[in-house]
Image: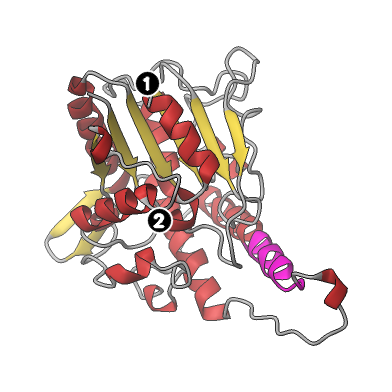
């Protein structure tokens, strides 16, 4: 029996079962939907938000709304602010990522401000950028989540609970993939945002990880130099493909105006096998100024088509 393992991205999330159901419902929606459970395909979610957040996000409806799927200024509390750096390496990592993500967000807003019908240029229209508190919240959340994972920070999301962030999330990924390995395959890992870093890190650098038949990365920051530098030892440009654990294809789906992926969305040249490109980069176009939403990505026909093919549907 085929199996899909999901890995969610940055920021707080609804409870695990609710989040997985949102992903499944979104994939199944529309004329070209992929109803995984209806096709007899089992699924699981590598859930890690509770490693960095005190409690589940109760605003479940927002995760299925295309309009509401922007970062929330309310998330920028004391826990989610960008980390205070202790070393020059950490400071360089944070500043480099902040510069690149901020520039892509500005580009997305500029494109969104262009009138849909250029024959109407000259007529008044209103540009509605993301408010600064929202952009600040997103940047700080992304920087905090990625930093804590890649630097294996010790963190307490709630009183009485402390994790070594990378160690804990790696353990959860390895456990989920190992359980799915018994399904009989094909087994595909579908990851989003920070989840793509987790999936790659474990499939490339953690020996205990079981083999999978394919990998889909969505809205991924893996093209960024700062992230690649922290995936060493293990990653190198000519031999970065995780062929030790990924037996089949790696599909990378991106929107050029996604602030997480857009600075360097094409990763085939960065994750090669003996100097040869194997990753298939696929561009999609999400709607609105906020392009990073998993809900928007899961509605994209090219992503759905690749998932069908990998699952042999």
What's the magenta bit mostly, secondary-structure-wise? helix
Q: Is 11 positioned to the left or the right of 226 in the image?
A: left
Front residue (pair 270, 94): 270
Residue 114 forms part of the magenta stretch: yes
**Count of numbered labels shown in the rendering:** 2
* Residue 132 visible at all: yes
Q: Is residue 279 left or right of residue 85?
A: right
Q: Can the viewer see residue 205 in this picture?
A: no
Image x and y of residue 36, in percent: 29, 39
Q: Considering depth in this image, is 211 or 275 the residue closer to the camera?
A: 211
The residue that label 1 is drawn on is: 213
Which one is closest to the eye, mark 1 or mark 2?
A: 1
The part of the image, by quadrant, that contains residue 283 is: top right
Q: Name the image quarter holding the N terminus.
A: top left
Label annotation for residue 10:
2
Please give the name of the residue rendered at 47% of the width and 59% of the height, measured from the top-left corner: 293
Bounds of the magenta span? 102-115
Classify 10 Å Cα crowding around label 1: few (below 14), some (14-19), many (20 and above).
some
Disc number placed over residue 287 in the picture, else none: none
Which residue shows up at 52% across the image and 26% down it? Answer: 235
Mark 1 to mark 2 CA distance (whole Å): 25 Å
Q: What element carries label 1?
A: loop
- Tell which of 42 and 220 is nearer to you: 42
Vertical side of 81 occupied by 128: above or below:
below
Q: Please tell me which residue is depicted at 68% across the width and 67% down the height of the picture.
A: 106
Left or right side of 165 for 109 = right
């Amino acid at each position: 029996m085929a199996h899909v393992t999901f890995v969610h991205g940055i920021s707080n999330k609804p409870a695990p079962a609710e989040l997985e159901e949102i992903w499944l419902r979104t994939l199944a929606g529309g004329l070209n939907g992929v109803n995984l459970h209806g096709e007899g395909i089992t699924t699981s979610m590598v859930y890690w938000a509770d490693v960095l957040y005190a409690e589940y996000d109760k605003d479940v409806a927002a995760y299925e709304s295309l309009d509401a799927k922007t970062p929330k200024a309310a998330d920028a509390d004391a826990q989610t602010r960008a980390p205070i750096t202790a070393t020059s390496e950490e400071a360089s990592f944070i500043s480099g990522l902040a510069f690149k993500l901020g520039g892509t967000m500005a580009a997305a807003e500029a494109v969104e401000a262009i009138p849909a019908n250029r024959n109407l240029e000259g007529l008044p229209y209103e540009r509605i950028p993301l408010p600064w508190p929202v952009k600040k919240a997103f940047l700080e959340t992304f920087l905090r989540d990625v930093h804590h994972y890649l630097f294996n920070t010790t963190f307490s999301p709630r009183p009485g609970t402390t994790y070594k962030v990378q160690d804990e999330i790696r353990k959860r990924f390895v456990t989920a993939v190992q359980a799915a390995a018994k399904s009989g395959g094909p087994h595909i890992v579908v990851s989003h945002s920070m989840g793509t870093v987790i999936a790659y890190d474990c499939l490339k650098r953690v020996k205990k990880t079981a083999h999978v038949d394919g990998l889909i990365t969505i809205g991924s920051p893996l093209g960024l130099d700062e992230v690649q530098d922290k995936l060493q030892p293990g990653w190198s440009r000519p031999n970065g493909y995780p062929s030790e654990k990924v037996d089949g294809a790696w599909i990378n789906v991106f929107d050029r105006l996604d602030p997480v992926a857009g600075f360097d969305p094409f990763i085939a040249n960065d994750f090669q096998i003996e100097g040869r490109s194997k990753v298939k980069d696929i561009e999609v176009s999400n709607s609105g100024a906020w392009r990073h939403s998993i809900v928007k990505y899961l509605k994209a026909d090219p992503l759905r088509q690749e998932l069908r093919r990998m699952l042999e549907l």
